[in-house]
Amino acid sequence: AQSVTQLDSQVPVFEEAPVELRCNYSSSVSVYLFWYVQYPNQGLQLLLKYLSGSTLVKGINGFEAEFNKSQTSFHLRKPSVHISDTAEYFCAVRLITGGGNKLTFGTGTQLKVEL
Amino acid sequence: DTGVSQNPRHKITKRGQNVTFRCDPISEHNRLYWYRQTLGQGPEFLTYFQNEAQLEKSRLLSDRFSAERPKGSFSTLEIQRTEQGDSAMYLCASSLAQGVDYEQYFGPGTRLTVT
């Protein structure tokens, strides 16, 4: 079975500072990787995904993530955060074959951007 | 395309009562997923449909839970004899089944509170 670990439950950061949200995964087979954002009282929105190819993927709202197969990591980064980035961020994996396309999520990281 | 919709958005019920939630997916999407999200956790997979067929159910889905998608369009999730442990956000998502580069689009969720 696959699993996702997000070690940081909360990350406070000042506006315009850089941020990194960490994600590590475990799986015996190959997976696709995703980052979702959830604003209060809303559903999840896809930020970016890694399917294949370049290990550095760029998403919406200036976010990017790097897939590191040897470290089984997929950390999310933004060089300069804005107050509107305050939200819960979830890392997720999906099996490349089988599994019905269902997503396995981490426990989430609450990003709080302060002035 | 108005996205995935879920009704009701909030439901408060007494322990032992039955509740039913509805999900309307994006119209051309043939896959529909249900997830449950408890406080401080990431979403957990419950079940998914391809068209009207329910193809997988998580062990989290006890006998008190039943989901249907009778015409391959909207879906309902019913919980019988609710328990306080059922209090959670229930998320619905839909996607296309074909192709690798797909995305699950999430609805805003139904928040269930069992008193």
Image: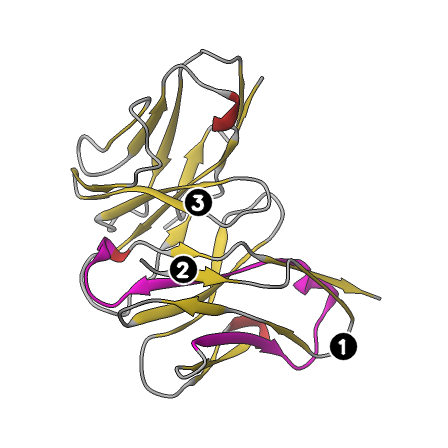
Same-subunit check for callouts 1 and 2: yes
Q: Position of residue A14 (x, y in %)?
A: 80, 71
Q: Position of residue B23 (x, y in %)?
A: 36, 36
| Magenta-highlighted residues | A72-100
User: Left or right: where does residue B89 sit relative to residue A8?
Assistant: left
Callouts 3 and 2 close, C-beta under 8 Å: no
Residue B15, relative to residue A36: is it above or below?
above
User: Left or right: where does residue A79 sit relative to residue B32?
Assistant: right
Circle 3 SS class: loop
Q: Position of residue A108 (x, y in %)?
A: 56, 56
Marks 1 and 2, the one that precedes in the sequence = 2
**Residue that extends furthest to the right in the rendered view of this protein:** A115
Residue B112, relative to residue A96: is it above or below?
above
User: Left or right: where does residue B59 sit relative to residue A114?
Assistant: left
Q: Which residue is mark 1?
A: A16
Q: Which residue is mark 3?
A: B107
The residue lying at 59 percent from left, 46 percent from top is B40
Q: Which residue is mark 2?
A: A3
Q: CA distance from mark 3 to mark 2?
A: 24 Å
Circle 1 SS class: loop
Is A62 part of what is drawn in magenta?
Answer: no
